[in-house]
Image: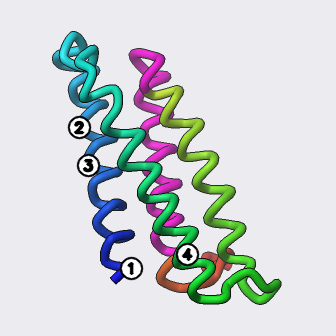
Amino acid sequence: MIKIFHLTFILLSISSFVGRVILAETHPAILKQKALKIAPHVIDSLLLLSGLTLIFQGGWLSTDYGWIIAKIIALIAYIGLGVIVMRNKGKTRWLAFVAAMACFVYIGIVAVTKQAFFFI
């Protein structure tokens, strides 16, 4: 059940991020609404909480599960790049957006393969 919530929050989080980037380019005034400022933080907090719950339920804190550390590092990069995306314009925004999407894809692949270095 927690896994379904986690996957739902992943979908909501990425949809929210892409939607906010589109709004930032097309209708930036809409992003000033209170709900659009609060909702992403609520979604991402629930995503993180469900992920931590899965880690503890699965007993994945041993050293055999280094892929979780890789996901956390990629998540931190994704968050940092997301901040850059939302605070900048032009080429910087789009380069950071592509890099954030690459982090998201990496996190997804690592979650499925359980291998941090799947590309080697």
Marks 3 and 2 close (CB-CB < 8 Å): yes
Q: Helix, strand or loop at disc 4? A: helix
List the residue tagged with mark 2: 19
* 52 relative to 4, above or below: above
Callout 1: 10 Å neighbours few (<14), some, many (20+)?
A: few
Q: Label 3 vs label 1: CA separation? A: 18 Å
Question: If you read the primary sequence from the N terminus, does the residue marked by circle 2 or circle 1 appear first?
Answer: 1
List the residue tagged with mark 3: 15
- Residue in the picture at 39% in, 79% down: 3
Segment colored magenta: 86-110
Question: If you read the primary sequence from the N terminus, does the residue marked by circle 3 or circle 4 appear first?
Answer: 3
Q: Label 4 vs label 2: CA separation? A: 25 Å
* 16 relative to 89, above or below: below
Marks 4 and 2 close (CB-CB < 8 Å): no
* 29 relative to 104, above or below: above
Quadrant of the image occupied by residue 42: top left
- Residue in the picture at 28% in, 31% down: 20
Give the mark toward the camera: 3 or 1: 1
> Label 1 is placed on what type of residue?
Lys
